[in-house]
Image: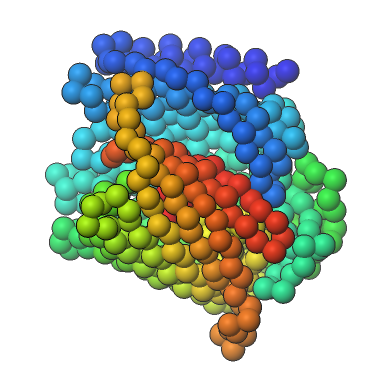
Amino acid sequence: MTAPRGFMAFLVWTFVWGGVVWPDLVRADVQVFPIPSASSSKNDGNDAGLIVPILITNPDGELQYLLAPMLIHNSIVGTRATMNIFRYEPGGRQMQFIGSISEKIERKLVFNYTDPAFSNGRYFLNFGGAFFKNATARFFGLGQETVESAQTNYTAREGRANWRFGVYANEVTLIAVSQRFRTVQLQQGATDLPFTGDVFPTVPGVVGETTIVGHRASFHYDTRNSLVTPTDGMAINAYAELDQNVRNHDNPIYSRYEIEVKKLIPSESKRAILVLRADLQATLGTQVPFFEQSSLGGQNNLRGYGVDRFIDKHLIAASIEERIHMLRTRIAGVTADFEFAPFLDTGQVFNTYKDVSFKDYRMTPGVGFRAIVRPNVVGRVDYGFSKEGGAVFAGLDFPY
């Protein structure tokens, strides 16, 4: 039982480190409430276990820290121990750390820091990095017409690093530049499915190690009243990115583009919020690794399918969701809102624009349940239905 022992050691280390580095924790109001957890998804199997959110607020009742240790048994990778640490500061600054270890293969370390009002609100700053091994990743081949019976499995061993710096043109418009580094290697997966490397050896990115360096320019227009828990407004995000596939000497350069529009329309009573989203992505180049192309499926789009169910160079997607307020109450000393959210996701991936057809759109209706501690915390569970069955996704944010 390496994972539980490692989890307990990590938990003890966290609180000792917290008492030294964050002395204000000693004086803060700390609320703890355990929550049983159970979920099931197409890729990741069945989960059952315990989450223990620890909410740390200042004397004014504002959330400063969220610590969420988790001990989960997964039907594929065994017992998984995870520690989530979120630190919240005035002005929207946020720091995130995630550490996770499983009995079988999987590991995860994530750090991320965001300051949307850097230098007295003139700039935006973000940087972070991650290393993880995801042993339940799936690949069905490229294209919209791939069949469920072609499913393969692999472990995605990845390292990532990124930074982004932006300048505010006005209160709602941000122009930013960023860079990212990504290294990926496919290894044997944790399931009994065929190994992706054996079935699709000729697909770009499957064999060997891939190293990507990306350079991006982006435009952000955002009138929403909150970055994390918005109830009104519009957001438009667009980027153009030039990428270098360092290990591909024949075709090392390709480019990626995206424009995404989100609109929130609250009812007069503010008890219901209609959320609309449209997304268009394009990838130009040859021998682009499959994991760098556009994908549908997962917790943020086409929620009735598993993660990355459909992959190809280009993507068109749209979603509609009605977030309906059900209850407001106090839990562990903080005010929490609960929402019920029926939704419909649709979209398709394609290799060229001449392949776009209305008959190829996939649709996944579903329903979500949300718990919100404004302005910083969202917990959600979404169930989506598709022709291949259903999928359940849980997360600590809105899908869009």
Please give the name of the residue rendered at 52% of the width and 52% of the height, measured from the top-left corner: 367
Residue 328, how many percent across, how many down?
32, 35
Residue 386, how many percent across, how many down?
65, 61
Q: In front: 95, or 235?
A: 235
Corner quadrant of residue 384: bottom right
Q: In front: 134, or 122?
A: 134
Q: How is the model colour-coded?
A: rainbow
295 sits left or right of 324 in the view: right
Q: In front: 230, or 118?
A: 230
Residue 181, how many percent across, how many down?
51, 53
Please give the name of the residue rendered at 57% of the width and 26% of the height, measured from the top-left corner: 36
Can residue 255 be seen at all in this image of the molecule? no
Please give the name of the residue rendered at 22% of the width and 63% of the height, measured from the top-left corner: 173
Residue 383, how many percent across, how many down?
57, 50
Please give the name of the residue rendered at 37% of the width and 50% of the height, measured from the top-left corner: 324
Can residue 346 be seen at all in this image of the molecule? yes
Corner quadrant of residue 322: bottom left
